[in-house]
Every structure is written in C-alpha cells, then in structure tokens.
Amino acid sequence: MKRQVIKLGPTDGSGAFTSAQGAAVLGRLYAIEYRPGTIDTGATLTVTCEGDASKPLLTKASAGTSNTWFYPRDLQNAIADGAALTGTAGGDRALPVLNGYIKGVLASGGTSVAGGSMVVYYMEDD
C-alpha cells in the first residue's frame, strides 16, 4: 500500500482552497484520512481523480474538526445490463480506480486559515 499526503490550505478570503497537482497514480483507492488542522467545522471537502476524465471520489459536507477516515467505494454494474447495479443497499462495492492525480477542494473552510491535509491510501497497479 502507498500513500500520498495532500495539503488542504491555506484558504483564501472566501474560505476556499484547491490543492496543487501531485504525482499521478494508477491504482485503486483504499481510504482517505482527513486531517482538518485549522479548517472550520462547516467546510465541504470534495476529492476527485483528475486524468483523461474527472472521477469523483468523495464529497463530505460539514467535514468537522476531528481527524476522520473515509472508505469510498463504487457500486458495481451487472454484466448483462451495464446500467443495472448489482447492489443498492450495502451490496457489491468495488475500490475506485485511480488514473491521474488526486485533487482536494475545500469550500467554506474558514477565512484565510492555515488549513490541514488529507492522506490518500491506495494500492498501485502494475
């Protein structure tokens, strides 16, 4: 397992921050550890993987001020009908595929605060 630490701050005068582009990742997401530091409790954290396309990984409104772990998962599709999901209420889930760089965006994180970070844990594919 590998990890990538992504800085979330400092925020601007409106409480917003967008992380810089980090190293590209090809693999599967295992977990995201949110370390808010000085980020306000009402902040919204949005995490995506940016490559040939943008893939949403996590959106958490009112993320809070405590260190928290998230385990995002994708619903799987049926083979016979690609639009049909195989599980809807706790059913089949897959580790999200990562193919690009991980981006974190904060909204309402507090006016001009130092911020915090997130740690993305992933398994690299060959």
Image (cartoon, rainbow, N blue to C red):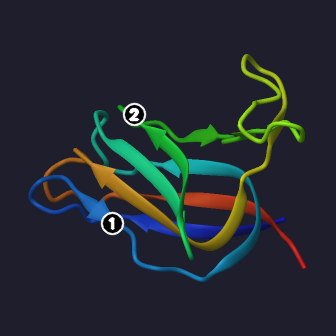
**Is disc 2 surrounded by few (<14), some (14 to 19) or many (20+) residues within 10 Å?**
some
Q: Is mark 1 on a helix, strand or loop?
A: strand
The image quadrant where one finds the C terminus is bottom right
Residue at the left extreme, as displayed: 13
Closer-to-camera residue (54/59): 54
Residue lying at 86% horizontally and 73% vertically, measured from the top left:
125
Q: Is residue 94 above or below residue 26?
A: above
Residue lying at 49% horizontally and 50% vertically, measured from the top left:
35
Q: Image quarter for residue 18?
A: bottom left
Mark 2 or 1 closer to N-term? 1
Picture coordinates of residue 41, whole percent (x, y): 31, 34
Closer-to-camera residue (91/116): 91
| Residue 64: mark in rendering | 2
Looking at the rendered structure, the kind of residue marked 2 is Gly
Q: What element carries label 2?
A: loop
Picture coordinates of residue 7, whole percent (x, y): 44, 67
Disc 2 versus disc 1: distance between alpha carbons?
18 Å
How many marks on residues?
2
The image quadrant where one finds the N terminus is bottom right
Looking at the rendered structure, the kind of residue marked 1 is Thr
Picture coordinates of residue 107, whole percent (x, y): 26, 48
**Is disc 1 surrounded by few (<14), some (14 to 19) or many (20+) residues within 10 Å?**
some
- Judged left or right of residue 23, residue 98 is right
Q: Is residue 102 above or below residue 37?
A: below
Give the labeled residue for mark 1.
18
Please name which of the two marks, 2 or 1, marks the residue nearer to the observer.
Answer: 1
Residue at the front extreme, as displayed: 80
Whether tag 2 and tag 1 are in contact, CB under 8 A, the answer is no
- Judged left or right of residue 35, residue 119 is right
Picture coordinates of residue 31, whole percent (x, y): 70, 49
- Judged left or right of residue 4, residue 105 is left
